[in-house]
């Protein structure tokens, strides 16, 4: 008669199942490269991993915002650099043709160049990014910021974009903050004159040989040029913030990924050693179970 009590088989079965489960677990870890494949494997670590991944996801979102902002700000910076160069040329022309010794015909020729530069600046004021969104119209990104006559048709909305847990950067530049008007004094009267109106009046003064208008244009072109310079400085400041924040996020993401790796990634050398140990343990348990289950009372009597 075989010696096979319920207790013996129950304990032996439990041991075998335990060995098999541990072996299956380490094999799964080696297959996936992850220590934790189910939340039940290590509830505390799984919860920590989930929190880490939530934070990393938020940081990745901030990085996406920063990439888009960088493109827009770089486009704005390039456009403003070109506008600045053109305004420098307009000021040179105004100074040159304010000279009373030049003829009306010479000034009319100069007016043609001024109008050509004006059209180029107008085109830059309506420039769009790679997604077809205007750069200088505030939140009205789907329409031209300035009409052909130079009147601003954007709005004054500047959208703040989150680039960190407590940091935002403006994503929209309003046209009137960049292409600033000037205050024109006419006796006791002060009038606000739009950016493009200043250039149009200079061209008109050259074309009609009104020397006083050309002379006035020198100061007014200088003022709108200063406005562009201030806008460039503002864009440059935003670019510095974006670059600094992007570097900070890269460092944080690298640190968080390191923590994730420590919690999640398998140490293959350790796991292989553990698997070999579990395989040997399972083989020993199976062999022991097989030998003991064959034993009968005669083995003990003899």
Image: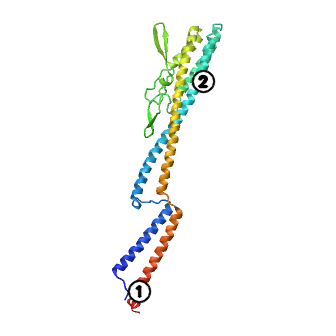
Residue farthest toward the bottom in the current orientation of the protein: 302
Residue 17 visible here? yes
Query: Based on the displayed image, in which of its 4 quarters is residue 166 positioned?
Result: top left
Q: CA distance from mark 1 to mark 2?
A: 100 Å
- Which sits earlier in the primary sequence, circle 1 or circle 2? 2
Q: Is residue 94 left or right of residue 55?
A: right
What is the image's colouring? Answer: rainbow
Q: Which residue is mark 1?
A: 295
How far from the left and from the top, in percent, is residue 226?
54, 21
Q: Which residue is mark 2?
A: 85
Marks 1,2: beta carbons within 8 A: no
How far from the left and from the top, in percent, is residue 111?
60, 15
Quadrant (top left/top right/bottom left/bottom right) for the C terminus: bottom left
Q: Is residue 100 left or right of residue 160?
A: right
Residue depicted at 50% across the width and 64% down the height: 271
Residue depicted at 59% across the width and 12% down the height: 206
Residue 72 visible here? no
Query: Disc 1 or disc 2, which is closer to the eye?
Result: 1
Residue depicted at 41% across the width and 90% down the height: 299
Image disc number at residue 132: none
Instruction: Say which of 200 and 243 sits in front.
Output: 243
For numbered disc 1, what is the local secondary structure?
Answer: loop
Instruction: Say which of 286 and 105 sits in front.
Output: 286
How far from the left and from the top, in percent, is residue 9?
37, 79
Quadrant (top left/top right/bottom left/bottom right) for the N terminus: bottom left
How far from the left and from the top, in percent, is residue 282?
46, 74
């Amino acid at each position: 008669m075989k010696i096979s009590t319920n207790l013996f088989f129950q304990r032996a079965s439990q041991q075998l199942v335990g060995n098999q489960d541990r072996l299956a677990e380490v094999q799964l870890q080696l297959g996936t490269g992850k220590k934790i494949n189910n939340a039940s494997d290590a509830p505390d670590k799984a919860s920590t991993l989930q929190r880490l991944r939530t934070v990393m996801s938020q940081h990745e979102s901030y990085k996406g915002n920063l990439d888009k902002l960088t493109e827009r700000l770089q486009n704005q910076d390039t456009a403003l650099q070109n506008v600045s160069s053109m305004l420098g040329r307009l000021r040179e022309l105004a100074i040159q043709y304010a000279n009373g010794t030049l003829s009306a015909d010479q000034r009319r020729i100069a007016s043609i160049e001024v109008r050509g530069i004006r059209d180029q600046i107008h085109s830059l004021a309506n420039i769009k990014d790679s997604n077809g969104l205007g750069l200088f119209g505030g939140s009205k990104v789907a329409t031209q910021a300035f009409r052909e006559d130079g009147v601003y048709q954007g709005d004054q909305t500047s959208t703040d974009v989150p680039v960190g847990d407590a940091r935002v950067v403006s994503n929209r530049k309003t046209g009137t903050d960049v292409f600033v008007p000037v205050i024109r004094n006419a006796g006791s009267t002060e009038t606000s004159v739009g950016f493009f109106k200043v250039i149009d009046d200079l061209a008109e003064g050259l074309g009609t040989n009104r020397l006083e208008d050309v002379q006035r244009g020198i100061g007014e072109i200088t003022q709108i040029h200063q406005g562009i310079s201030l806008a460039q400085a503002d864009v440059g400041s935003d670019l510095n913030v974006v670059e600094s924040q992007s570097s900070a996020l890269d460092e944080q993401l690298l640190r968080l990924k390191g923590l994730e790796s420590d919690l999640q990634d398998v140490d293959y050398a350790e796991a292989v050693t553990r698997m070999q140990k579990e395989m040997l343990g399972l083989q020993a348990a199976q062999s022991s179970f097989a030998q003991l289950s064959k034993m009968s009372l005669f083995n003990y009597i003899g």
